[in-house]
């Protein structure tokens, strides 16, 4: 799974750069410190709080959500609230994100054939042929090839494959656009048998209104 990048310069109330400031990154939703990384693939974690560099800059990668970011140096403290971090902005504007990330914790192993909570369309949308810009993957790679079924009202319309030892997924299908009506339901179903090592599943599909 590709992570989103945060990068900012830190300043005090007089406009002076804050060099060596402590940068605390928390979830607005839970209040917990979030896991941050130095790379887009999330392979190398960094301390949280982290520090601004010699130019007063701070950067990290993290999973998408609303963040509270606090910069502190001595008596100076600045808080950035409800910062929306995510990868959706990397994709074309004519694709509307409508499916929230369906995600296990990093320590959980998805059950064999487990169906994730469904998404019910509130308005008419179009599933685009080939699922352009769809993203997904695992935090912990599987030992064997993984194929996840994507269901529309109980019928498979696409698959998502994660190769053994890999983290990022590839998507296959549908061959043609699919028109949704209000109330249509979409959900992914985990492989059966399960992989004892795979964990941290997430996926996002883009639709067009």
Image (cartoon, grey):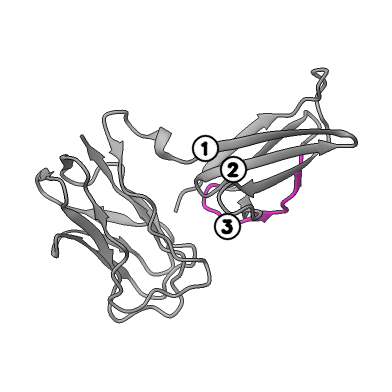
Query: Could you tell me which secondary element the residue under label 2 belongs to?
Result: strand
| Image mark count | 3
Query: Could you tell me which secondary element the residue under label 1 belongs to?
Result: strand
> Marks 3 and 1, how far apart in space?
22 Å
Residues rendered magenta in the picture: 40-51
| Labelled pair 2, 1 in contact (Cβ < 8 Å) | yes
Which quadrant of the rendered structure holds the C terminus? top left
> Pointer 1: residues within 10 angstroms few (<14), some, or many (20+)?
few
> Pointer 3: residues within 10 angstroms few (<14), some, or many (20+)?
few
Instruction: Look at mark 2 in the image and give the residue it sits on.
Output: 67
- What residue do we see at 57% from left, 37% from top? 82
Instruction: Look at mark 1 in the image and give the residue it sits on.
Output: 84
> Does the segment drawn in magenta span residue 47?
yes
State whether residue 38 is above or below residue 209: below
Residue 43 marker: 3
Location of residue 90 in the rendering, given as x and y in whole percent from the top left corner = 41, 34
């Amino acid at each position: 799974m590709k992570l989103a990048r945060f990068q900012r310069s830190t300043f005090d109330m007089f406009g002076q750069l804050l060099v060596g400031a402590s940068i605390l990154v928390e979830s607005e939703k839970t209040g917990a410190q979030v896991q941050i990384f130095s790379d887009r693939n999330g392979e190398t974690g960094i301390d949280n709080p982290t520090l601004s560099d010699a130019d007063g800059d701070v950067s990290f990668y993290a999973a998408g959500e609303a963040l509270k970011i606090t910069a502190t140096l001595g008596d100076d403290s600045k808080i950035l609230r409800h910062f929306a971090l995510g990868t959706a902005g990397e994709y074309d504007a004519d694709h509307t994100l409508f499916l929230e990330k369906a995600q296990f914790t990093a320590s959980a192993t998805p059950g064999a054939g487990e169906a994730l909570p469904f998404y019910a369309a509130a308005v008419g949308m179009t599933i685009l042929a080939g699922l352009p810009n769809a993203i997904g993957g695992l935090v912990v790679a599987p030992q064997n090839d993984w194929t996840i079924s994507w269901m529309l009202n109980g019928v498979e319309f696409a698959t998502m494959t994660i190769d053994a030892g890999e983290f990022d997924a590839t998507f296959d299908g549908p061959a043609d656009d699919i028109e949704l009506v209000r109330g249509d339901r979409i959900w992914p179903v985990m492989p059966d048998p399960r992989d004892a090592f795979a964990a941290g599943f997430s996926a996002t599909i883009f639709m067009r209104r």
